[in-house]
Image (cartoon, helix red, strand yellow):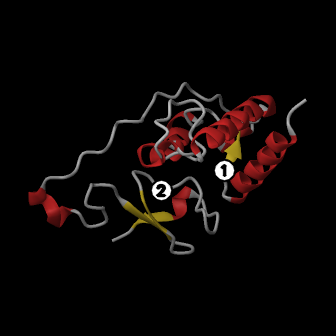
Amino acid sequence: MRDQTVLDTYERLKREAEAAGYFLNPDVEFVLDLVEGLLTNEARYGYWACPCRLAEGVREKDLDIICPCDYRDADLDEYGACYCALYVSEEVARGEKAAQPVPERRGSKPSAPAEEHEEELVGFTRCGIPVWRCKVCGYLCARPQPPLKCPICKADRDRFERFW
């Protein structure tokens, strides 16, 4: 029997994921194990460090792996699941596609563009990451690819444009 806190947290996480256009892994027992790991890390560190990664225990050093981690959307897009497989793509959630093994992205940062190319930075942040705009609601985000769904209006990725 699972602890009620784990079950309540799972329900909240599922509601929040669906409200934002994301899907949890359909293997509920697997997700409940991950939720236990998140809650254990919260008790240890005070935040939801990814249960499948080794956390430093210092929030500033772990910001990129606080769930949902910085790598979730890129992993979903490329592999159909995030690193720990808590989140999966819509196709994986529906059983239409299998998730692929996800390599660790942590530590691979995009390189900053050379200073002499600053005029080419239109639509990019200074570190070379593009800025995307939801054409439906105007939401802006800086990331390598637009999100799968707009967190504000739930529009699909194809409704985003490079913000110029």
In-image side of 42 versus 120 (left or right)? right
- In this view, the residue in front, 51 or 24, is 51
Residue lying furthest bottom: 137
Q: Which mark is residue 22?
A: 1
In-image side of 47 versus 113 (left or right)? right
Above or below, comparing residue 37 to residue 160 in the picture: above
Cα distance, mark 1 to mark 2?
14 Å
- In this view, the residue in front, 91 or 84, is 84
What's the residue at 19%, 52% (across, down)? Answer: 113
- In this view, the residue in front, 103 or 153, is 103
Above or below, comparing residue 158 to residue 32 in the picture: below
Residue lying furthest left: 116
Residue lying furthest right: 1
In-image side of 163 versus 63 (left or right)? left
Inspect this view and state whether residue 104 appears.
Answer: yes
What's the residue at 38%, 69% (across, down)? Answer: 163
Q: Which residue is mark 2?
A: 146
Above or below, comparing residue 67 to residue 15 in the picture: above
Q: Which mark is residue 53?
A: none
What's the residue at 33%, 71% (across, down)? Answer: 164
Question: Where is residue 119 shown, x and y percent of the image?
Answer: 16, 66
Q: Residues within 10 Å of mark 2 (few under 14, many from 20)?
A: many
- Say which amino acid is labelled 2: Pro
User: Which numbered disc, 1 or 2, marks the residue that appears first in the sequence?
Assistant: 1
- Say which amino acid is labelled 1: Tyr
Q: Nearer the viewer, mark 1 or mark 2?
A: 1
Above or below, comparing residue 78 to residue 143 in the picture: above
Question: Where is residue 99 shown, x and y percent of the image?
Answer: 61, 29
Inspect this view and state whether residue 87 appears.
Answer: no
